[in-house]
Each structure stands twice: as C-alpha cells, then as structure tokens.
Image (spheres, rainbow, N blue to C red):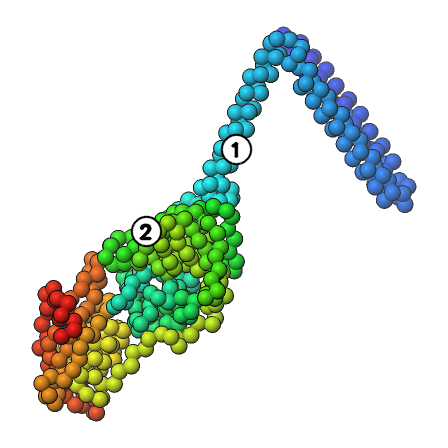
Amino acid sequence: MFNTLEKQFDKLSKKIKSKLSSWAKRLKAYFKRLLFPIYLFPIKLITYSIYYLIKFTLRLIWSLIKILFETIIYPFRSLKNFLKSVFILVVVLYLLASLMVILDYLETNYGNYEKFFCAFGTRERLKSSVVRIVGGYSEGSGFFIDENRILTNFHVIDNEPSPKVILPDGNFLSPVKIVGDQDADLAVIYVAEKYPDLVLPLPYETVLVGEEPLLSAGYPLGTELNGAATVMEGKFDEFRKSKYSFTNYIQTNFTVVEGMSGGPLTDKCGEVVGINTLGVAGLSLFIEAADAKTLLPTFTDRDIKKIEVDPSKSPEDAVRAFYMYLKARRMQDGFNLLSSEYLKNTDFEEWTGRFKDILDVSIYKSERYNNSRYVAFVKFSTKNWVGGEAEMHYYEGTWLTVLEDGVFKMLEADIVEVESPGWEWFYE
C-alpha cells in the first residue's frame, strides 16, 4: 500500500515539475520577446498592455453575457429550477428591502451614513462638557471653545460683571475677562484655569442635510433644577436669516427652554453646529457655529458691565465696594477693605474660607445709617452653591467703618439673615 502511495506521489511530483518547467520556459521566452531588441521595449510594453487589456475586457464581457443568458434560461429548464429561481428571487427582494429599511433608518436617525459609526458616546460627552453660567439675575449654559474660553449667549451675561462658570464636576470658576457682541447675542468668558478635555471646538463651516438629527445640551431652568446637563434631540429644519441679525440661524423642530441658552447644538457625532439661542413652542433657533467662529476676533468688552466702585467716597460706597468685590471674587481687594482692627481677629485664608461657596452677591441698598458719620445700612443677598444646588440667603444690617489711609474700611458688622423676605423688603 505504501509503495503504491509513494509511486503516485512521485508521479504527481514529476507532473508538477514538468508543468513548472514548461511555465518557466514560456515565461522566459515571453520576457525575451518583450525586452529584445531593447529599443523596441517601450513600444512593446504599450502594445502588449493594450492587447491584454482588450483581451481581458472582451473575455469578461463574454463571460457576463453567458452568465446572464444562463440565468435567464435556467428557470425554464425544469420545474425544479423554476421553484429554485422563485425562492432565490424572494430572498433577494427581501434582502434588498431590508437594506433599504436599514439605509432609511441610518438617514433618519443619523443624517449621514458615516455618522452612524461616530455617534456612540456623544450624549455622555456633552453631559460631561457643558457648563452652567450663573449670575445674580440670569442663568444659562455654555461650553469651552478652547482650553480657557467659554462661549455663551450675550443675554446670559448681560448686566452681569462677574458671572460664575460651574463645571460638570460641581466646582465653579470666576472670569478673568469677558468680551462679546450684544448685537450677535454672543459672549466669551475667559478663565485662568485650562480645561483641554472639555473643549468642543467651533467649525469653519456648517453642513447639514434635510431632517438631520441634532442634539442640544444645556441646563433647563438653571440652578432651579440640579443634576447633569440635559441633552435634547430633534431634527434640522432649515437655515434662517434675519435682517436684524449679523448671524445665520439653524431652525429645528424641538424646543430648548430657559437655562439652556448658550449651550451647544451638535450633530450625532458631537461636532458643534450651533449655539442654543431661542426656543418657542415646537421650534428653536440656534446661532450658526461657523458664524460665531468668524465673529470671535471682533468681540470687545464695550457692552460688558464693569465693576466701578470707590471706597474712598463714603461709608456706603465702601460697603458697596466690599460686597461687589465678593461678587466678583476679587478676594484680595475685599480683604484690603478690612480695617487694621478687624484684621487682628482673622487672616486672608480664614476670611476667604467664609465665602468659598458664594456664587453671587446682589446689593439692594447701601446708604448712610441715620445720618451717622461712619455707619452704613445695607441689604443684600447671596447665591451659594451647596451640594450641587443654588441656595439664596438674604441679609440686612449695618457696617461700622473707619477711615484709614483715605479709604473707608470695614470695622464692625451687625448683619442678620432675613428669612423668606416679602416683595416689600426689596423696595422699602
């Protein structure tokens, strides 16, 4: 048995060697004809290439015709072939219909087919990147457009000299600079710290297809509703333009609510296409992100409210300056308004620790108390950030001041908290 197998193997080996030898000889002869004489090589190379390309094309066409012919006549050769053909046709039609359903689903839920692969994790990224913007009179949302600049709507920071930026982890930052364009309803808040992991960059152009799904992120109702950012989903409707605006708008079929202004509008991949601006029943308008990027270099602080105080004018001006410095978290300036007598009982670290949770201070009244020379009466409120929620506290009382180095400084306070003040408290 083994001898028979060995003979068959030897026979097969000889046959393979003979074939290889024959192919090698033919290949050698072919290259000899191609290369020599050498001066004809370029012409031969071109003509051979054209010849074999035409030959391959003709054979391919003929093969396709034969396959098509066989396919057409196959069902009519027998009943069995006919039934097989019907079954195959049904399967093919089913697969085509399924493919069309899948393509329609991808277009409906992702806009462009390629966005299907980059859509995973977009919601979580937005929730971990969008920030709160909190002032004394207004609140909104925003997002980092680079490592230390946050974009928001101008109406969110209007009349707010020092709005605070609350990060997704609950920590908050004070601005070192604010610029904007009131007409475009856009503003940029600069912070000292850098957060490259939170950046959602603006695009150079905005490209959207009909009814493309879009995501809007922000903090609805501001600090009245605690927790992470809300991500809403809807569809792109069309681009809009107003003769009263310097920017184009994106219109969608869903409604962003108060508190979400300034947050990002993105596609399914998390690429920013707009800025939350206005929502009414059933639709919203978003400033086109590419327009915002174009306008950024023109932003100034011309329309930004400034803190203008002079503690050397009077005790009431000094008290107002003291609380304005707390509002802006200009802690060193506030500390410098403490009298030498007051400083005997505290230092900078202990004193600033008393106000670590204060987001904002609103001053309702600061006036001379009963025509006294050095006493001022003050009413104010603080907005404190405690455990992820904003708490309002209201105070009133007097500050005794003392004139030191030409400045009225804080000497002694008699301030009490007012529980649930009525509307008349703010105006009396």
For the question of whether residue 411 can be seen, the reply is no
Under circle 2, the secondary element is strand
Q: Is residue 119 left or right of residue 1?
A: left
For the question of whether residue 38 can be seen, the reply is yes
Residue ID for mark 1: 100
Mark 2, other Cα within 10 Å: few <14 / some 14–19 / many ≥20: some
Residue drawn 9% across the image and 72% down it: 416
Question: Tag on residue 285?
Answer: none
Mark 1, other Cα within 10 Å: few <14 / some 14–19 / many ≥20: few
* Quarter placement of the N terminus: top right
Residue drawn 36% across the image and 54% down it: 280
Q: Position of residue 56 (x, y in %)?
A: 77, 31
Q: Is residue 91 left or right of residue 131?
A: right
Residue drawn 42% across the image and 51% down it: 252
Under circle 1, the secondary element is helix
Seen from the viewer's position, the closer of residues 428 and 11 is 428
* Quarter placement of the C terminus: bottom left
| Image quadrant where residue 316 sits | bottom left
Q: Is residue 205 left or right of residue 63?
A: left
Q: Position of residue 312 (x, y in %)?
A: 22, 88
Q: Looking at numbered disc 1 in the image, what kind of residue is underneath it?
A: Met
Is residue 191 shown above or below 97? below
Q: Position of residue 192 (x, y in %)?
A: 35, 70
Q: Which residue, as the protein is rendered here, is positioned at the far bottom?
A: 406
Q: Which label's residue is closer to the chain start, 1 or 2?
A: 1
Q: Position of residue 145 (x, y in %)?
A: 42, 62
Q: Is residue 329 left or right of residue 45?
A: left
Residue drawn 47% across the image and 46% down it: 212
Q: Looking at numbered disc 2 in the image, what kind of residue is underneath it?
A: Thr
Seen from the viewer's position, the closer of residues 9 and 238 is 238
Disc 1 from disc 2: Cα separation: 33 Å
Question: Tag on residue 230?
Answer: 2
